[in-house]
Amino acid sequence: MWIVVADSSACRLFEVSAPAGPLQEIEVLSHPEGRLREQDLVSDLPGRTFDSQGAGRHAKEVEVSPKQHEAIVFAGRIAERLEAGRVRYAFDKLALIAPPEFLGLLRDKLNPQLRALVLHEVDKNVTRLDPAAIRTRLPERLF
């Protein structure tokens, strides 16, 4: 079983070989752009447009903020890594631990085959905790 502990700037992959066993860290992915401030991710102001009627002008609305875009990109990268592990039969079950908003983004990026392997989800940000502390956030018996 693999345990995915992630937020918008870091992902730690753990493996558990026994239902009540400890976590063994197997890989770390980082996304430094996820730590940048919104103003550091954009180079200029949004474009301007004219109203369809009349002489008014206004700034164009951005559908997704640059910070959210970076989180979506990283969630996709994590999902690609998990898919690579799935097709190699590196794991047969998954647990996801992430802050609520990032957990939703990650869920959206998982294909149906990966989603079917998710046994546990925890909506907490624990990326900076040690493996033993992370393990306490999961059920005593994982599978």
Image: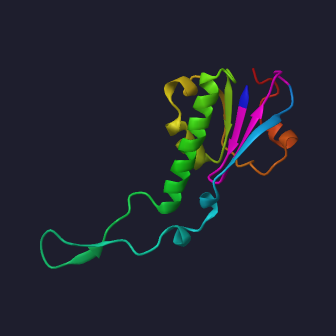
Residue 29 on image: x %, y %: 68, 46
Pick the quarter of the image with the N terminus.
Answer: top right
Viewer-nearest residue: 103 or 73: 73
Left/right placement of residue 11 relative to residue 58 reads right
Residue 20 on image: x %, y %: 85, 24
Instruction: State which quadrant residue 35 falls in.
Output: bottom right
Pick the quarter of the image with the C terminus.
Answer: top right
Relative to 58, is 96 above or below? above
* Magenta-drawn segment: 3-20
Viewer-nearest residue: 30 or 120: 30
Left/right placement of residue 38 relative to residue 121 reads left
Residue occupying image coordinates x 57% and y 22%:
116
Residue occupying image coordinates x 48% and y 69%:
42
Residue 60 on image: x %, y %: 31, 68
Residue 104 on image: x %, y %: 55, 42
Q: Is residue 9 magenta?
A: yes
Residue occupying image coordinates x 69% and y 24%:
90
Relative to 79, is 32 above or below? below
Relative to 114, is 68 above or below? below
Q: Is residue 97 magenta?
A: no
